[in-house]
Amino acid sequence: MSAKYFRTNGHLLVCQGPNCQARGSALLHRALWNHLERESLAYYKRGGTLRLTESGCLGSCSFGPSLCVYRAAPGVGLEEAWYAAVDFPLAARIAQAVHEQGPLPAEHQYGPE
């Protein structure tokens, strides 16, 4: 038996550390999950390409919720972007940019440079 391969454009990780949770990261994760489902952006939906995962601390504890993106970028290899103080509209724009393989929003980004 072989496993089905799901093509992905990127991986979104939402911090679930205690400080981010106190700032709404669990609700952000749930809202983003629902958005990926509704818009068929989740990797297991027809045409979808995004993975979403809860993560441990992403290092911007005083500025959560935090979100990290990893995606393959032509000529770059693995591209990563880290965001602090993420609200749902920003998370949805990030997800759409990753899905479309477009430029990532610059607002609220922090390291790595």
Image: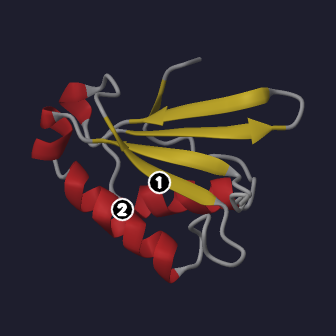
Read off the residue under disc 1. 52
In this view, the mark in front (1 or 2):
1
Which residue occupies the foreground of this view, 37 or 99?
37
Q: Residue at x 53, y 60 (%)?
A: 93
Q: Amino acid at mark 2?
A: Phe
Q: Residue at x 22, y 61 (%)?
A: 27
Locate the N terminus by quadrant. bottom right
Q: Which x, y percent locates residue 40?
A: 59, 78
Q: Which x, y percent locates residue 97?
A: 65, 56
Q: Is residue 109 above or below residue 7?
A: above
Q: Residue at x 50, y 47 (%)?
A: 12
Based on the displayed image, in which of its 4 quarters is residue 83 positioned?
A: top left
Distance (Cα) linking label 1 and label 2? 14 Å
Q: Is residue 37 above or below residue 18?
A: below
Q: Amino acid at mark 1?
A: Leu
Q: Residue at x 25, y 38 (%)?
A: 64
| Other-residue count near label 2 (Cα within 10 Å), few / some / many at <14 / 14–19 / ≥20 | some
Based on the displayed image, in which of its 4 quarters is residue 95 positioned?
A: bottom right
Image-based side of 4 in relation to 42, left or right = right
Mark closest to the chain's N terminus, 1 or 2: 1
Based on the displayed image, in which of its 4 quarters is residue 90 positioned?
A: bottom left
Q: Which x, y percent locates residue 5?
A: 73, 58
Q: Is residue 37 above or below residue 90?
A: below
| Other-residue count near label 1 (Cα within 10 Å), few / some / many at <14 / 14–19 / ≥20 | some
Which numbered tag is attached to residue 88?
A: 2
Colour treatment of the image: secondary structure
Which residue occupies the foreground of this view, 25 or 4?
4
| Mark 1 residue element | strand
